[in-house]
Image (cartoon, helix red, strand yellow):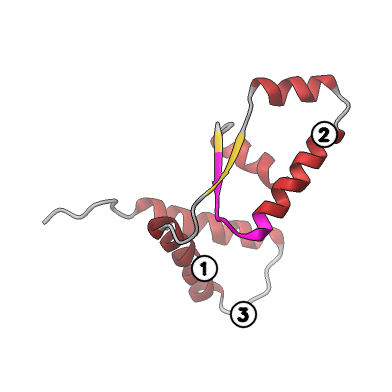
Amino acid sequence: MTLQRFFGRRGLPHTIYTDNSTTFHDANRELISLWNSLTSTKVQQFYAINGIKWKFIVSRTGWWEQLIGLTKQYLGNSLGRALLDEEGLQTALIGIEAALNSRPLVYEL
């Protein structure tokens, strides 16, 4: 469901880059297993036509790791120890996404 929301908001990506954690490797295995278990030829054709690659970043890649750290920091600063439902968490993450995407990529002197 999360990927469906992402695709709905951003369109179909050609490649998905994720952190190199074991969680994502496990998810990748689950998705491959799900893919292999699909029997609907229409679904298989759709994904084959819009083939999506899943790549893992190299561990300790500086700016990727910094974005992950900033996201965690913003979550901690804005939410503290609050418990949110799914909609509340999505709202918080969308706000963080906007903040991260609005900052300048380079600084002019």
Q: Secondary structure at mark 2?
A: helix
Tell me if label 2 and label 3 are in contact, CB under 8 Å: no
Q: Secondary structure at mark 1?
A: helix
The amino acid on which the numbered mark 3 sits, given as a three-letter code, is: Arg
The amino acid on which the numbered mark 2 sits, given as a three-letter code, is: Asn
How far apart in space, not on screen, are marks 2 and 1 (Cα)?
34 Å
Tell me the residue that label 1 is attached to.
72
User: In which quadrant is the C terminus drawn?
Assistant: bottom left
Tell me the residue that label 2 is attached to.
36
Which numbered disc flags the more N-terminal residue, 2 or 3? 2
Which numbered disc flags the more N-terminal residue, 3 or 1? 1
How far apart in space, not on screen, are marks 3 and 1 (Cα)?
13 Å
Q: Residue furthest front?
A: 58
Dividing the picture into quarters, in which one does residue 90 lie? Answer: bottom right
User: In which quadrant is the N terminus drawn?
Assistant: top right
The amino acid on which the numbered mark 1 sits, given as a three-letter code, is: Lys
Tell me if mark 3 has few (under 14), some (14-19) or many (20+) residues whose alpha carbon lies within 10 angstroms of its own: few
The part of the chain drawn in magenta is 16-24
Identified at 74% across, 47% down, the residue is: 29
Q: Secondary structure at mark 3?
A: loop
x and y, in percent, of residue 74 in the image: 47, 68
x and y, in percent, of residue 93 in the image: 55, 58
